[in-house]
């Protein structure tokens, strides 16, 4: 997942902290003359500037503070070269921000008593798949990327992407492949960001609940939180501009191959800005959804507790220079990019989405985050996705 270069062979499961390298190098492609808006520029004008002059085909932004939505806007076009504007309920692919959702659903399963955070791969999956050297790895270690499991080799990811098997067979194959990789470190000793951790964790959830990961997310998050536009894979209909198209940097028809469904728990969700506003409120409201509790206080604390390299369960967690708790994650399938920043104690959040997954767009969205943090007085940070 840590590919420190501006051109990624494949970014779906392995793109989490590329932004750090992009920003350190001043962005990819060079020659960027764009000047971000000053903090006192009106938000609508700032968003229009980022779209019109900043090179983003579309941008969706929401700011929450004190539990209240202070600002929300979707602007731009669904597809470069087409005049169709993005709509307020359009869904964007969120890539690895799916991981926070998988961890949250895992928390509901732990609260139900079907799993524990220290349940092991061997205890849950033994007899259903060869667990290799990972039998003693715990659910918590998988979700915090401290299992020792390395990232899938690119050729293996591409081979699984090309599969046409039913999703349950794909997931089993993807998990078995991850469990067959030699560990790069002893469990609990090193942070290694790898999508296979979440694929294996997803299979554990499926095993103990007898429901697919997709059904679990739908029943335990999308429906109770009011996320009607959330789903899986690329949004939109092949050949039609009825949803945002991804760009890399040219527009890519939604009928093309994306991250394989078998990798779902690591990064295949799409959602609208409104869906994600409702989702982040769970963390801001102490585990509560609009119609009742989603996870317990204890589970939320487990998710937000930083482990190695400040990674909790599905989120980078820590505190700002001013001591404010902060949770951050980004995600990309190289055609879309998402960045979410939460300040749970302040009940504040920033959600930013775009339908361009190229490296310059990552750096641009970081500028979007910097502008909105400054405009609304949220604790600053640069780069955000680190």
Image (cartoon, grey):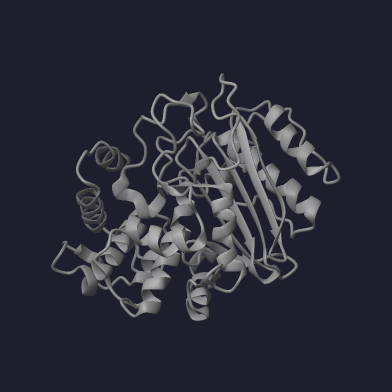
Q: Residue 31, position in %: x, y?
A: 68, 25
Quarter location, residue 364: top right
Q: Residue 332, position in %: x, y?
A: 48, 43
Q: Residue 36, position in %: x, y?
A: 76, 37
Q: Residue at 33%, 58% (x, y): give it.
A: 215
Tell which of 39 and 113 is nearer to you.
Answer: 113
Q: Residue at 62%, 42% (x, y): give it.
A: 60
Q: Residue at 41%, 42% (x, y): give it.
A: 12
Observer able to see residue 152: no
Quarter location, residue 252: top left
Q: Residue 308, position in %: x, y?
A: 49, 67
**Relative side of 205 to 164, left or right:** right
**Relative side of 310 to 3, left or right:** right
Observer able to see residue 168: yes
**Relative side of 55 to 189, left or right:** right
The vertical placement of 378 against 72, above or below, is: below
Q: In this view, which residue lies farthest toward the top?
A: 81
């Amino acid at each position: 997942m840590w590919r420190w270069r501006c051109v990624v062979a494949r970014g779906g499961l392995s793109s989490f902290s590329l932004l750090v390298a992009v920003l350190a190098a001043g962005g990819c492609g060079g020659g960027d003359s764009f000047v971000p808006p000053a903090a006192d520029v009106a938000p609508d004008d700032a968003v229009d500037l980022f779209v019109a002059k900043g090179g983003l085909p579309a941008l969706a932004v929401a700011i929450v503070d004190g539990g209240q939505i202070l600002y929300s806007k979707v602007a731009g076009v669904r597809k470069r070269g087409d005049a169709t504007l993005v709509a307020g309920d359009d869904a964007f692919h969120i890539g690895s921000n799916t991981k926070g959702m998988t961890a949250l659903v895992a928390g509901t399963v732990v609260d139900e008593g079907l799993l524990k955070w220290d349940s092991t791969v061997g205890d849950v999956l033994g007899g259903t798949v060869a667990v290799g050297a990972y039998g003693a790895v715990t659910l918590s270690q998988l979700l915090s990327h401290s299992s020792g499991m390395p990232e899938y080799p690119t050729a293996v990811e591409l081979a699984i992407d090309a599969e046409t098997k039913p999703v349950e067979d794909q997931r089993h194959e993807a998990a078995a492949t991850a469990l067959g990789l030699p560990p790069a470190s002893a469990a609990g000793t090193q942070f290694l960001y790898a999508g296979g951790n979440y694929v294996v964790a997803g299979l554990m959830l499926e095993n103990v609940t007898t429901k697919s990961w997709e059904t679990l997310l739908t029943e335990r998050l999308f429906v109770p939180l009011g996320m009607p536009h959330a789903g899986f894979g690329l949004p939109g209909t092949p050949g039609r501009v009825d949803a945002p198209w991804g760009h890399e940097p040219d527009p890519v028809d939604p009928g093309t191959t994306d991250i394989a469904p078998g990798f779902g728990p690591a990064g295949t969700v799409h959602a609208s800005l409104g869906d994600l506003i409702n989702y982040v409120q769970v963390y801001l409201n102490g585990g509560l959804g609009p119609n009742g509790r989603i996870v317990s206080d204890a589970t939320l604390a487990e998710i937000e507790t930083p482990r190695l390299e400040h990674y909790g369960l599905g989120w980078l967690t820590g505190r700002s220079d001013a001591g404010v708790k902060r949770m951050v994650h980004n995600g990309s399938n190289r055609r879309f990019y998402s960045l979410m920043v939460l300040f749970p104690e302040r009940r504040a959040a920033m959600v930013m989405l775009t339908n361009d997954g190229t490296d310059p767009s990552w750096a641009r969205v970081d500028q979007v985050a910097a502008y909105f943090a400054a405009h609304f007085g949220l604790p600053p940070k640069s780069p955000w996705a680190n």
